[in-house]
Amino acid sequence: MNDTSWGAPSRAGYWGAPDQGPVQGAAPVGPAHDAHALNPSETQPMPIVPDVAASGGHQDDDRGAAQSSGPLFRDETAHAAHAAHSSNPAQKPQEPMTGAPQPAPAPQKKSAGRDLGAAIGVGVGLGAVILASLFFEKAVFVGVIAVAVVVGLWELTSRLQERKAIKAPLVPLAVGGAAMVVAGYVRGAEGAWVAMALTALAVLVWRMTEPPEGYLKDVTAGVFAAFYVPFLATFVALMLTADDGPQRVLTFLILTVVSDTGAYAVGWRFGKHKLAPRISPGKTREGLFGAVAFAMAAGALCMHFMIDDGTWWQGLLIGLAVAASATLGDLGESMIKRDLGIKDMGTLLPGHGGIMDRLDSLLPTAPVVWLLLVVFVGSG
């Protein structure tokens, strides 16, 4: 169909109906009649339905909604453009400027993803509390560990119940977790294992007071939480029992923080190759190399200057092990959070998330550092 079909009727009719042949009573076809049909003054143009949007009509009209779905015929768009040009001759169609240079897109700045000001402030505050309690009185620092364990258990069990409807009993976990840390400091590894067994038993019994539906998943999550948070944290208390316990704990904290900082700094600046994109898309292989380099350098310095009878090469090995365990711990909690469909375990620490978001790399690193220190320099 071309544009002339909208201005004058043809033998096929306005809408392209097939020719029905001569009609009785109609004027014969001839030159005179053809000339009469082509007389513009007597031609009856086909009415054109105006476009609602172009004519300023209401867009809530049903006809406007129909027009928004596109033209019914291919030449409808061309006709609308021709009508708009005829109504405003001064306006000429814009032609694409193929030879003009296109402006380059503005470079995007990398974002840290968190409020760095708040994160630094909270980190400095936590560091001050830890250092003050660590070198003031060992028992006070044990209390700090116990409080962190209880808050971490509360965050973990709350997220499990919210996202997976898993009701791990918090009361026996909190009481048993705090007792586990104290038992580890007072009675050593044997006391920690006994407290762990009693906590697991308390979880099984406590859950019996509720209906049996979901019992297995609830107690399984409870035993997992008891091992994951308080039992692993007990190794920090075990490090503290040595004569140079504060220095050992400080070495453990420094190496873990330096490993995380090196991974973040190098990965943010140079990271291109994903380490585990399905688990944690933000982590890169370059960041892992940064974690290893920073942790090994810090380990050599800490073992040489802070640990009795420690040597620099032992620090290199400890730093390498810390980089590996901290990365695995971070990935492990990322797996948990991805399964739960959350970004952070909590909101208690601005710029950091929750307590568990800070303990993720510390918890699995504690037994690694404790064991290597015992192997290299003894239990103290």
Image (tube, grey):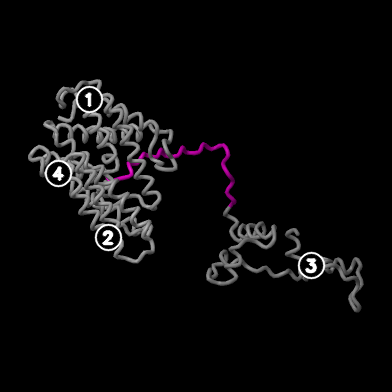
Name the residue carrying label 2.
206
Overall secondary structure of the magenta stretch? Answer: loop
Q: In the rendered structure, which disc, 4 or 2, sits on the residue that comes first in sequence? A: 4
Dot 4, crowdedness within 10 Å: few (<14), some or many (≥20)?
many
Answer whether labels 3 and 2 touch (C-beta < 8 Å). Answer: no
Residue 9's tag is 3
Q: Residue at x 75, y 58 (%)?
A: 2
Dot 3, crowdedness within 10 Å: few (<14), some or many (≥20)?
some
In depth, the one of 358 and 164 nearer the eye is: 164
Q: CA distance from mark 4 to mark 2?
A: 27 Å
Q: CA distance from mark 3 to mark 4?
A: 97 Å
Helix, strand or loop for disc 3: loop
The mark lying in front, picked from 1 and 3, is: 1
Residue type pointed to by label 4: Val
Q: Is residue 115 above or below residue 255?
A: below
Dot 1, crowdedness within 10 Å: few (<14), some or many (≥20)?
some
Residue 380 percent coordinates (x, y): 14, 30
Q: CA distance from mark 3 to mark 2?
A: 90 Å
The mark lying in front, picked from 3 and 4, is: 4
Name the residue carrying label 4.
142
Answer whether labels 1 and 3 touch (C-beta < 8 Å). Answer: no
Helix, strand or loop for disc 4: helix
Q: CA distance from mark 1 to mark 3?
A: 102 Å
Name the residue carrying label 1.
376
Residue 376 percent coordinates (x, y): 22, 25
Residue type pointed to by label 3: Pro
